[in-house]
Amino acid sequence: MSSIKTEQQVPLVRMVKRDTITQKKTWTIRAVAFVCALLTGALLILFLGKNPVQAYMDMIQGAFGSSVLRQETIKVAIPLLITAIGISFAFKMKFWNIGAEGQILLGAIGAGYWGFFWADRLPKVILIIVMMLSAILMGGLYGLLPALCKAKWGTNETLFTLMLNYIALYMIKYLQNGPWKAPRSSFPKMAMLQPEARLTKILGVHWGWIAALLLVILAWIYFNKTKQGYEISVVGESNNTARYAGINVGKVFRRTMFLSGALAGLAGFLQVAGCDFTITETTAGGVGFTAITVAWLAHMNPYGMLGVAFFIAILERGCNQIETTMAIPASVSSLLIGIILFFMLGCEFFINYRLIFRGGKEVSHA
Amino acid sequence: MLNIILKLIVAAVIAGTPLLLGALGEILTEKSGNTNLGVEGMMYMGAVSGIAGAYFYEKAVGGNANGVVGALIALLISFLIGAFGALIYAFLTITLRANQNVTGLTLTIFGTGFGNFFGDYFGKKAGGSLVVGDAIKSAFQGVSIPVLSKIPVIGKLLFNYNWIVYFAILVAIAMAWFFNKSRVGLNLRAVGEDPGTADAAGINVTKYKYIATVVGGGICGIGGMYISMVSQGGVWVYDCVSGYGWLAVALVIFATWDSSRAILVALVFGALKIMRFYVELPIPSQFYDMAPYIVTILVLILTSMRESREHAQPKSCGTNYFREER
């Protein structure tokens, strides 16, 4: 009698935290989630009345089909990777910096000032270095501002950094319409950079790709091998623990956010001097948001970000391709990125927990 | 002078309504202990689905579309699609225990893509852009309430808006009553403050969180529909929500999680949004456009400087509730 009663009380599914999980299982779960995301994307394309296999093939073609296309894909990946590394600095200490978009734009303004007005007065090497340092400084200061307030008063950094994005955007619009408007242009737009202010190409792509690869290694060392990197992790785990351990939390906030913004600013500089050769409202073009995805999917691991940034770049370039070949609007890329991230966020649950179904048979669900 | 102030206030109400709806949806969500940063995304989803719903209704019935029916369809579909976005968020954070901030941001990325993609796609199919006909457009214009709207000054100030303005204010008042007077509302607040205690008291925490989050998302979706149908006048415009959702999240803080106070705060921010057309200062127009965001930052700093416990965010916001890990 009593056994029947307990039988009824066992829920259909219950979850138990896993003690350990093998690497292989972890990656299987992630792979299954990833395939599910692609299938969901395929369903969406099917719903539009197009052939999903064709669409995915076209996307790969659009990202890798020729050496020019490959270079374009790398160009998209560079700012994404650098910004993602920057964001991971902040996210590792649970400081929600969603202002990378604005920090990129400020970096662009910092670089643009020297690029537009000093190009004929400075030798090329010095000009480029000054542009870069100015971009890093501007981006860093723009990131520092919310950190100052957070450290002093606990101001909500999520909204603060986000509002700064819009302010940066209107700054660009202001410069476009007024002080930095290209001479002899009837449209409100800025001039093109002179050749002296443009980055040298190495193997077909501006040298930003070397900087990005170097930063991957440097960031890994910083996070894992230095005292400052360790402080970031402790602050991320718990502000109070950090305080008890004698870490100056406010100082870590300020230092780390300066670095975070500085990297975004660097990405802005590379975008202006290496890719667009001018500044527009779309200089940041959503990179600041997509980079959050990159950082999170890679679990803040710089090497992981290298892979994810590439993947997202392929996706974005691919979506441009299917816009022309299959008349599917390119904005499908953020829809697909969203779907993939939803699945990857969800699958972490199955890595941390296992499900036990009624009847005693233990199934680890993928 | 009085005339200009009157016009400014009327325009502020019209511009502030989507902010109010977004903020109300987020207040409901946060009262259950979930911070959903996907408001911007859900507003995009509501914006495109509302206009698309009205458009396809129009196409289905041919030339004789009824404006009221079209408006109701837009309302219903935008609510459902906004709620669908919130449902994804709820499933990930409540059932699968994913990080609330990142899930919300993902919802914003997803929703922005959803809005712009379907806006583009249906627009191209419609042969250019997604536009609704005059019958439905006029259903979203201001209605002069008989007799009352004839009262001097007050008539213009209070009785001349489109129906969603009144709808939003009703929702705000109903929510204030719900949170303070009804048992279910008080239970919901308990869930948001301390889910462990609420659970021990026999409240179904998961159910409350799901319903509050999903309905909250639906309200945000209606706010988005307002943008496409009223602010843009029944035409889909690429990137039309552009920041309204984020301002709405900020408004929740300024309204101190109080839905009736949200009406006032939304009015102030509505005024900031349209100030440039009514107040002339010798500054470039872009600085006017910056104003709501700068003011938001200033208010954020000010409210953080004098932290009061009574008017604070529900305590469990941001952390997921695991019954097994209390």
Image (cartoon, coloured by chain):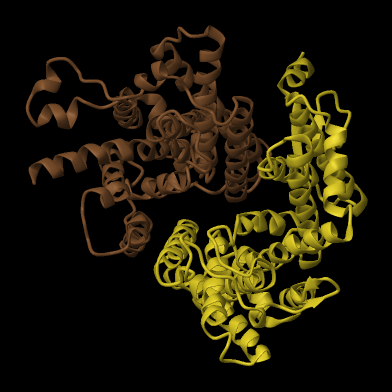
What is the x, y in percent for residue B68?
A: 39, 13
Q: Which corner quadrant of the image does residue A97 belong to?
A: bottom right
Chain ID for brown:
B
Front residue of A160 and A348: A160
- Check the image and name the residue furthest to the front: A184
Front residue of B206 and A40: A40
In the visual, does A306 lie left or right of A188? right
What is the x, y in percent for residue A260?
A: 60, 71
Residue beneath the point at 44% across and 29% down: B222
Residue beneath the point at 76% across and 62% down: A305
Whether residue A350 can be seen here: yes
Task: State whether residue A20 is above or below residue A270.
Answer: above
In the visual, does B308 lie left or right of B85? left
What is the x, y in percent for residue B38?
A: 54, 43
Task: State whether residue A333 is above or below residue A294.
Answer: above
Task: State whether residue A158 is above or below residue B247.
Answer: below
- Check the image and name the residue furthest to the right: A24
In the visual, does A144 lie left or right of B175? right
Whether residue A255 can be seen here: no
Quarter occupied by the C terminus of chain B: top right
Q: Colour of chain A?
A: yellow
Residue beneath the point at 72% across and 81% down: A226
Front residue of B16 and A109: A109
What is the x, y in percent for residue A74?
A: 79, 63
Q: How many marks?
A: 0
In the visual, does A108 lie left or right of A32? left
Residue beneath the point at 41% across and 44% down: B248
Q: Which corner quadrant of the image does residue B302 belong to?
A: bottom left
